[in-house]
Amino acid sequence: MVWLHLACGLSRANADRLMKAIHLLILLAINFGRLLVKLQHPNLAVEMPLPTPLIPHNVRTAITTLSLDPKIIRSICCSKCYAIYSLNHIPEICGRQETARSQPCGAKLWTTRSTRSGPRRVPCRLYSTRDFDSWLEFFLSRPGIEDLIDKSYDYNPSPNIMHTIWDSPAWQSLGLFTTTRANLTFAHYIDWF
């Protein structure tokens, strides 16, 4: 189910339904096996204990059990100026200033939302990112990724036309690091064009 959910795009709700159905089928098979034993050996006084499978009933539990949960870093983001605040210390209003002499942003960082258990005070906007180290571990463990990385270094940059990032003068200005095999370069929110 985890594979169907993560790799094939099966929705969480459908994966959960399918896991519950598989759990019921396994329980039916176990009970059917017990019934067959009783029918074949009606005088058998000792009941054979069969294990009850410990199958999670939802895909999130299965993902956690298999240690496939990504490490997510959550913080609060101002909806007006996009300043980031730690979950440990969230002020009522955003105090970020563009410059030392400018006015603070002043946007509210908290709101009240209706929930099943009544109104609840929550941050206006959460900002979630995946921990880079855990993402890199996941990325490099993908089958064939190292071969693809090695293959990328075989590209010969074009002097006249930019076909890829490798042709970019900005990329080439980064020096030998970007053209040396086994060196990886990462960027956040870069729009090269």
Image (cartoon, helix red, strand yellow):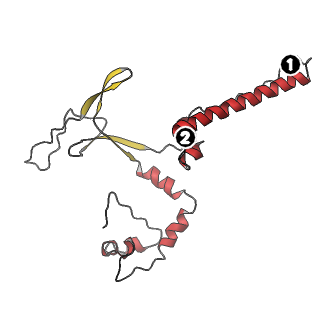
Q: Position of residue 90 (x, y in %)?
A: 25, 35
- In the image, is residue 184 above or below residue 71? below
Q: Residues within 10 Å of mark 2 (few under 14, many from 20)?
A: some
Q: Position of residue 86 (x, y in %)?
A: 29, 39
Residue where numbered disc 1 is placed = 46
Q: Is residue 50 visible?
A: no
Query: Of the residues shown, which amino acid type is indicated by label 2?
Result: Ile
- The residue drawn where x is 58% and y is 34% is 17
- The residue drawn where x is 9% and y is 47% is 102
Kind of element beneath mark 1: loop
Kind of element beneath mark 2: helix
Q: Is 43 placed left or right of 21 in the picture?
A: right
Residue where numbered disc 2 is placed = 63
Q: Residue furthest bottom?
A: 159
Q: Residue furthest left?
A: 101
Q: Position of residue 34 (x, y in %)?
A: 81, 25
| Real-space CA distance between mark 2 and mark 1, rounded to the nearest whole angstrom | 39 Å
Q: How many marks?
A: 2
- In the image, is residue 31 above or below residue 12? above
Relative depth, front residue between 2 and 28: 28
The image quadrant that residue 188 belongs to is: bottom left
- The residue drawn where x is 44% and y is 80% is 156
Quadrant of the image for the C terminus? bottom left
Query: Of the residues shown, which amino acid type is indicated by label 1?
Result: Val
The image quadrant that residue 66 belongs to is: top right
